[in-house]
Image (spheres, rainbow, N blue to C red):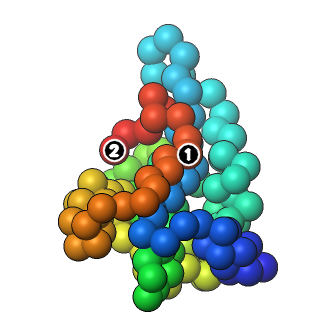
Amino acid sequence: MYQERREKLLATLPEYSITILMSGKAAYNIGVERHPFDVDRSFFYYTGLDNENLVLMFVKTARMNQTILLIEPFDPVQAKWVGGKILADEAREISGIKDVRYVDSLKDTIAMYSNHYGTLNQFTLCGELSKQEY
């Protein structure tokens, strides 16, 4: 289901384009109190994932379409105290996306594709950047 949705979106994107969707981040109140997290609905529609601080990246060229999911690294100490982040295998299973990387490689991944293919026809970023930690 999610794979079909991503394929339909990729079919509408122009060649030599990068499209990025962000899942979002929970807002903080004064201090460290967090509001409940609501995933970006478009992100959920294409992945089935409702975790915060994830990125979905579509790369389309004349010869290939690629979908990349970027997740936060799992920290066992953090998991013990505040809950763990999604694991790569779990993200693959739910979303059906095989290419799973870590969010700290987002800038390098964008740079690699944009440098490798030269001029991009379109770069689209969807999500509220003020709530992201990249």
Vertical placement of 96 versus 109: above or below? Answer: below
Quadrant holding the C terminus? top left
Q: Is tag 2's residue or tag 1's residue first in the polypeptide sequence?
A: 1
Across the whole image, how many numbered discs are drawn on residues?
2
Badge 1, how many Cα within 10 Å: few under 14, some, many 20+? some
Give residue 19's position: percent from left, percent from top: 50, 58
Q: Nearer the viewer, residue 10 or 68?
A: 10
Give residue 68's position: percent from left, percent from top: 46, 72
Write the residue at 66% across / 34% down.
Answer: 36
Quadrant holding the N terminus? bottom right
Vertical placement of 99 versus 127: above or below? Answer: below
Q: Nearer the viewer, mark 2 or mark 1?
A: 1
Query: What kind of element bears circle 2?
Result: loop
Quarter residue 51 falls in: bottom right
Work out which residue is located at the far top of the displayed protein and give it.
Answer: 30
Q: Nearer the viewer, residue 7 or 79?
A: 7
69 left or right of 36 in image = left
Q: Nearer the viewer, residue 132 or 51?
A: 132
Give residue 16's position: percent from left, percent from top: 42, 69
53 left or right of 101 in image = right
- Name the residue beneath numbered marker 1: 126
Residue 23 at least partly seen: yes
Write the residue at 70% across / 53% down.
Answer: 42
- Name the residue beneath numbered marker 2: 134
Vertical placement of 72 versus 82: above or below? Answer: below
Badge 2, how many Cα within 10 Å: few under 14, some, many 20+? few
Write the residue at 38% across / 50% down.
Answer: 78
Give residue 40's position: percent from left, percent from top: 66, 46
Q: Amino acid at mark 2?
A: Tyr
Q: Amino acid at mark 1?
A: Cys
Write the residue at 46% across / 35% down.
Answer: 129
